[in-house]
Amino acid sequence: MHIQINELKEMLARGPMTFLFRKRNGDARRMTATTNPDWIPENQKIEQRTEKAITVYDMEKKAFRSVSVDAFVCA
């Protein structure tokens, strides 16, 4: 499944979503994450560091993660 990066950003901004991505070592990982501030603890803030990755809040790990835009497999 190919998804446009802008569409993915919009979906993450609406609230938590589950997606599959490929880690640097080649393993596939499922993550439930969001960029919506209503779902992120008040004392934490997302900072986008690069255009090549999306910084998200991992709902299970309760931490920020950066995922390469090329690593997304499906949403």
Image: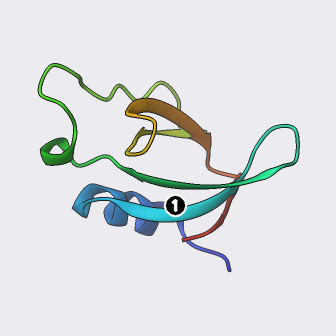
35 lies left or right of 21? left
Q: Which residue is mark 1?
A: 5
Vertical comparison of 6 with 37: above or below: below
Closer to us: 2 or 36: 36
Q: Quarter-wise, where is residue 55 in the image?
A: top left
Percent coordinates x, y for residue 19 in the rendering = 55, 64
- Kind of residue indicated by mark 1: Ile
Vertical comparison of 65 with 58: above or below: above
Callout 1 crowding tier (Cα within 10 Å): few <14, some 14–19, many ≥20: some
Helix, strand or loop at label 1? It is helix
Taking the view exactly as shown, the residue that stands out farthest to the top is 43
Q: Quarter-wise, where is residue 13 in the image?
A: bottom left
Quadrant location of the C terminus in the rendered image: bottom right
Quadrant location of the N terminus in the rendered image: bottom right
Q: Residue at x 35, y 25 (%)?
A: 47
Q: Residue at x 53, y 29 (%)?
A: 50
Percent coordinates x, y for residue 39 in the rendering = 19, 46
Q: Residue at x 37, y 45 (%)?
A: 59
The number of numbered badges drawn on the structure is: 1
How is colour applied across the structure in the image? rainbow
Taking the view exactly as shown, the residue that stands out farthest to the right is 26
Vertical comparison of 45 with 51: above or below: above
Q: Residue at x 66, y 76 (%)?
A: 2
Percent coordinates x, y for residue 46 in the rendering = 31, 29
Closer to us: 71 or 28: 28
Percent coordinates x, y for residue 60 in the rendering = 43, 44
Taking the view exactly as shown, the residue that stands out farthest to the front is 60
